[in-house]
Structure formats: structure tokens, C-alpha cells
Image (cartoon, helix red, strand yellow):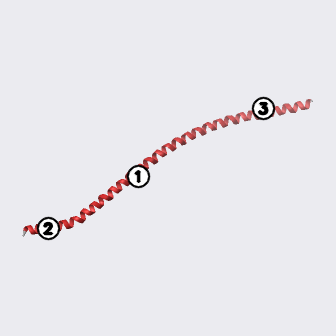
């Protein structure tokens, strides 16, 4: 009788544990999927971080180039003012020479 009772209890436990085992398998599967997605997200974030660093380096390089160009433009402006002044003086000299004739 005790053996039969133990067998009956064992069968009941199997019936109750099987759904729990299946749920645990499902949870493990979901966790594996989540881990894979997290790994993919991590890789994407790392790629974005690298891209951001490259972009910043290019941006800094462009800012440096712009500063050099700005300096060159300022020098050209000063030279053009000198040319303009010399041209004005030349026109004044030409006007005086025309008056002398």
C-alpha cells in the first residue's frame, strides 16, 4: 500500500512539475534572446561611440582648417586695403599729372 501511495505521489509530482519545467525552459529561452539582444545593442553602442569619436576628430580638423583660412583671409584683406590705398594714390598722381599738361 505504501508503495502504491509513493508511486501515486510520484506521478502527481511529475504531472505538476512538467508544466513548471516547461515554463523554466521558456524563461531560459527568453533570457537567452534578451542576452543576445543586449549584446547586439552593446555592439551598436560601441560602433556609435567610435563613429562619434571619428566625427569629433574630423570636426576638430575642420575647425583648425577654418581658423587657418580665416587668418589667410584677414591677411588678404589687409593686402587689398594696401592695394586700394596705392591705387588711390596713383589716381591722385595721374590727376595731378593731367593738370600739369
What residue lies at 17% left-to-right and 68% top-to-bottom? Answer: 12
- On residue 86, the disc is 3
Q: Position of residue 35 (x, y in %)?
A: 35, 54
- On residue 5, the disc is none
In this rendering, would 3 be left or right of 41?
A: left
The residue labelled by disc 2 is 9
In three-dimensional space, the C-alpha distance between marks 3 and 2, rounded to whole angstroms, equals 113 Å
In three-dimensional space, the C-alpha distance between marks 1 and 2, rounded to whole angstroms, equals 47 Å
Quick check: 5 above or below 97? below
What residue lies at 81% left-to-right and 32% top-to-bottom? Answer: 89
**N-term mark: 1 or 3:** 1
> What is the quadrant of the N terminus in the image?
bottom left
In this rendering, would 50 be left or right of 33?
A: right
What residue lies at 91% left-to-right and 32% top-to-bottom? Answer: 99
Of badges 3 and 2, nearer the viewer stands 2
Q: Secondary structure at mark 3?
A: helix
In this rendering, would 81 be left or right of 19?
A: right
The residue labelled by disc 1 is 41
Contact, mark 1 vs mark 2 (Cβ under 8 Å): no
> What is the quadrant of the C terminus in the image?
top right
**N-term mark: 3 or 2:** 2
Q: Position of residue 52 (x, y in %)?
A: 49, 46
The number of callouts visible is: 3
Amino acid at each position: 500500500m505504501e508503495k502504491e501511495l509513493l508511486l501515486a505521489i510520484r506521478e502527481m509530482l511529475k504531472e505538476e512539475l512538467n508544466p513548471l519545467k516547461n515554463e523554466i525552459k521558456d524563461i531560459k529561452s527568453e533570457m537567452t534572446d534578451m542576452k543576445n539582444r543586449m549584446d547586439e545593442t552593446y555592439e551598436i553602442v560601441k560602433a556609435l561611440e567610435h563613429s562619434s569619436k571619428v566625427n569629433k576628430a574630423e570636426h576638430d580638423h575642420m575647425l583648425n582648417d577654418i581658423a587657418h583660412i580665416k587668418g589667410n583671409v584677414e591677411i588678404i584683406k589687409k593686402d587689398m586695403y594696401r592695394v586700394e590705398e596705392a591705387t588711390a594714390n596713383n589716381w591722385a598722381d595721374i590727376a595731378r599729372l593731367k593738370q600739369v599738361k
